[in-house]
Amino acid sequence: MRKLSLSLVLVFTVLFSATGFAAEPVKTLPGDITLAQAQTILAAALKKAEEIKIPMNIAIVDAGGNLKAFYRQEDAFIGSIDISIKKAVTARYFNMPTRALAAASQVGQPLYGIEVSNDGLIIFAGGVPLVDKNNVIIGAIGVSGGSIDEDESVAMAGAAVIK
Amino acid sequence: MRKLSLSLVLVFTVLFSATGFAAEPVKTLPGDITLAQAQTILAAALKKAEEIKIPMNIAIVDAGGNLKAFYRQEDAFIGSIDISIKKAVTARYFNMPTRALAAASQVGQPLYGIEVSNDGLIIFAGGVPLVDKNNVIIGAIGVSGGSIDEDESVAMAGAAVIK
Amino acid sequence: MRKLSLSLVLVFTVLFSATGFAAEPVKTLPGDITLAQAQTILAAALKKAEEIKIPMNIAIVDAGGNLKAFYRQEDAFIGSIDISIKKAVTARYFNMPTRALAAASQVGQPLYGIEVSNDGLIIFAGGVPLVDKNNVIIGAIGVSGGSIDEDESVAMAGAAVIK
Amino acid sequence: MRKLSLSLVLVFTVLFSATGFAAEPVKTLPGDITLAQAQTILAAALKKAEEIKIPMNIAIVDAGGNLKAFYRQEDAFIGSIDISIKKAVTARYFNMPTRALAAASQVGQPLYGIEVSNDGLIIFAGGVPLVDKNNVIIGAIGVSGGSIDEDESVAMAGAAVIK
């Protein structure tokens, strides 16, 4: 078998050395959500989902709106994988709960049609920003699997643990 | 002409042998829809379509939401190829007839805008889950070509034969 | 705030009752990967990633190729979110490690160009099928963040725990 | 439940009446592949697949390059659903076996890169045009699941029955 040793990390280091960096730069904004935080949030959200007995998809994105962690419980809708991720993305892209977009996006309302932007936004409840103890938005959580009220209650249970 | 003899199946067998498997692993979860079942469902759906004299597109997906079989009758809308497949996918992704999504997705209703998720859902009637004799959802059927009531009647005629 | 009480789960139950089902059908094929299994696999993969000191994206899909769980470690490439998911999908779609596709997809080889199918396959190492104790493929794991050998070593560490 | 009686077929009829057509126009080009032909082709292809013991995805498109019929056998690669359809589309889009595109699409060759057009072409063997007794191309068949030679042999077995 061919020897495959090319490392993206190596390429990265070489390139930055070549451009004169003294040390490898910091890659992640200080304060962005950590995997440990995401796991704590997921655990709290799962606990709530189990209490209300609705199998859920739970997605967490970071401050850049990029996927950080995801869980799908047994029997949760396959179609809600994408919805939960889009709810989290939408909540971070606009720094508000997705419920807030619903009213403004109805027929005749100012943001009518916004859902087709960004490769598809979700404009109903279940996505909420993640705000840490320093009052900084460090990402968002999106939940899908039950009614929108159930989804949002699970998202809020997750978001609550890092405040 | 070049000799092209590399077989994916061969590669697969060799690799798994190399990693110590005694036998080739089972590739399909037991209980998933078979092609024979899909053909029986298609035949029943075609029979209904011929009875009501509406040319139809008929799509069947498996338990994972992946296409298993498809027929388009003469004169059936070309634009309904995609609709029939999306109806089947949608019905499996949410484990319910697509008709159930229609009411909840109207203007002002909780799931308004859901259709932009999952690269496009179909939120009107004509997709129904396929439930077998053991009461397990093994896939879904989606039909498009006539009115949504006609489409759904053909889908249900197909779904009925495996119960 | 509007009262949004319509539950998809409720709709589902009512519709199936109306169509004569005695009990709610089984929604997941027995034997498919569970969230508990996915969490165990993620933990083993994380452990390996920490040992080799490479921050990773780790994705797990079920038997149908649909996302089940995902973690991104601090400083792991954002661009590897999609790669790790596509590696897992590719490994399940072809029931083989993605490394096996690399050789066959090179210039002049039989499968040259295959990567443009399926909305983008990943045809280098780091995705491996998940085979359980019963020798059934229940999904796949995809890892991206380091060299392809590092990625694959993390994927294999994850896959090893359910054998 | 709301009465849903709007028929696309009705709309169609009304619109064409309004524009002065005496009778409903012929919707399908005379001579295009029929579902009966597609079923015959599928049966012949399945027979060959069973003989060589390779589970296959088999797709048939019509003269317009639009999906007409599709079968996936048990254990056939999920990733080959898309490949088989794209092989059929590619074979009809260029009126030649997909094998013919392979040589011309290699690095340094005239059509290098063509596979990214048309939302993804497949440029290796397994897709062949369907030519009827009148020497008219009425569609194409695409097969994926084994080596490219195996795939092509199944496609040719299917194509042979309508010549």
Image (cartoon, coloured by chain):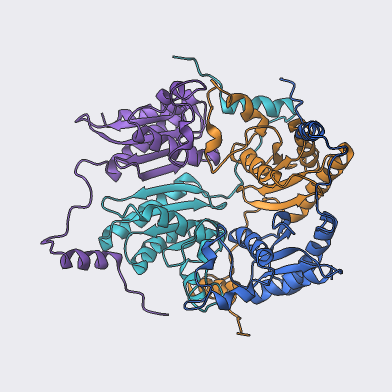
Chain colours: A purple, B orange, C cyan, D blue
Residue at left offset 39%, top offset 65%: C152
In the image, is A31 to the left or to the right of D117? left
Front residue of A19/C80: it is A19
Name above or below for residue A18 compared with residue A83: below
Quadrant location of the N terminus of chain B in the rendered image: bottom right
Where residue B47 sits, quadrant-wise, is: top right
Quadrant location of the C terminus of chain B in the rendered image: top right
Q: Position of residue A160 (x, y in %)?
A: 31, 28
**Residue D86 in view here:** yes
Q: Position of residue A82 (x, y in %)?
A: 49, 41
- Report the label total: 0
Front residue of D6/A16: it is D6
Front residue of D124/B62: it is D124
Single out the residue that lies furthest toward the front: D20
Name above or below for residue B109 compared with residue D69: above
In the image, is C50 to the left or to the right of D127? left
Where residue B2 sits, quadrant-wise, is: bottom right
Residue at left offset 87%, top offset 42%: B50
Q: Position of residue A122 (x, y in %)?
A: 46, 33
Front residue of C126/B149: it is B149
Residue at left offset 64%, top offset 38%: B91
**Residue A73 in view here:** no
